Image (cartoon, rainbow, N blue to C red):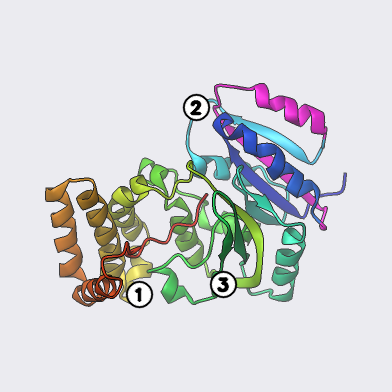
Amino acid sequence: MAEPRISIVIPFHSSYAAYLPECLESLRRQSCQLWEAIIVDDASPDRGWEALLDRLADPRIRLLRHAENRGQAAGRNTGMRAARGEYLVALDCDDALAPTHLAALLAALEANPAAGAAYSDYRLFGADEGVLRFPQKDLRALLTEQWIPHPGTMVRRALFEASGGYCEEPVFRAGNEDWDYFLSLAEHGLQAVRVPEPLYLYRQHAGSITTQRFARADAAMRERMAERHAALFDRHGLRRAFLAGGYRTSGKACLRDGIWGRGLALTARAAALDPAGMMEVLARRLRRSGGDAADGVHPVTG
């Protein structure tokens, strides 16, 4: 077997076993075949799904296990630290890749030696269909908006190692571990290049992490991110706007759930930190005539 250039890391739990065959088959159909896949089983109670790996008998696919459930951030760290490839890709086990995904992102990185990451647009499938486009922006924008999508993005392993990888703290079990990860990469000079094609196939279903749970936790997650990357936020003067976005999101979620005291307190904190941002949000809501605004939520994990 040729030495892999690309390592694909797939955090896994048996509750998603029905989606794994399609995920792995999309790897086997890649036009670029110099890859390995590392499935990290996060203490699944059911191991019957392993028969799939026996049937495939593909030496490029290997399995690692956690003795205890530790979450997706830990799964990605485990896989990427065991990886042999020069390039790393996080792939969610319920998603898939278009056949040219790996080849296109690898070519983009090789054509742009200063870039530490390459990403593509997303094609939605499953319960909803469409295309998500992620225009390329700058580092300053990354401090208030996660404009780099996470699953499917190809990162140079040297940059991952310099950053220390994903933060495994419990606060990020609800999400945002990917945005925090990109901020860690940004502290080590992250530049990203976009391949403007929908090459990552992003499944839409009821099990998606983009939920009310995420919105309720956004304020706490952003507070921790602002602490972890304080120098980065202070250098660009965006700490207040970043925190305010989280307070608005969590405040709105609490109000929706009838948690009036916390919802009003978080909304007031957002207004105090970023009055202009709050006015912009209110104006947007008025224009939408009471429509449901996103209020700064930018999760892209599956």
Q: Is residue 223 magenta?
A: no
Nearer to the camera, 202 or 69: 202
Q: Amino acid at mark 2?
A: Glu
Q: Give the mark count.
A: 3
- Measuring 68% from the left and 33% from the top, which residue is drawn there? 63
Residue at numbered disc 1: 235
Q: Is residue 66 above or below residue 76?
A: above
Residue at numbered disc 2: 68
Distance from Cα at disc 1 to Cα at disc 3: 17 Å
Contact (CB < 8 A) between labels 1 and 3? no
**Which quadrant holds residue 104?**
bottom right
Q: Is residue 38 magenta?
A: yes
- Can residue 156 be seen from the camera position used here? no
**Which quadrant holds residue 42?**
top right
Query: Which element is circle 3 on?
Result: loop
Q: Amino acid at mark 3?
A: Gln
Distance from Cα at disc 3 to Cα at disc 2: 35 Å
Nearer to the camera, 301 or 204: 204
Q: Is residue 237 above or below residue 17?
A: below
Q: Quadrant of the N terminus?
A: top right
Q: Position of residue 140 (x, y in %)?
A: 42, 75
Magenta residues span 31-57
Nearer to the camera, 201 or 154: 201
Residue at numbered disc 3: 191
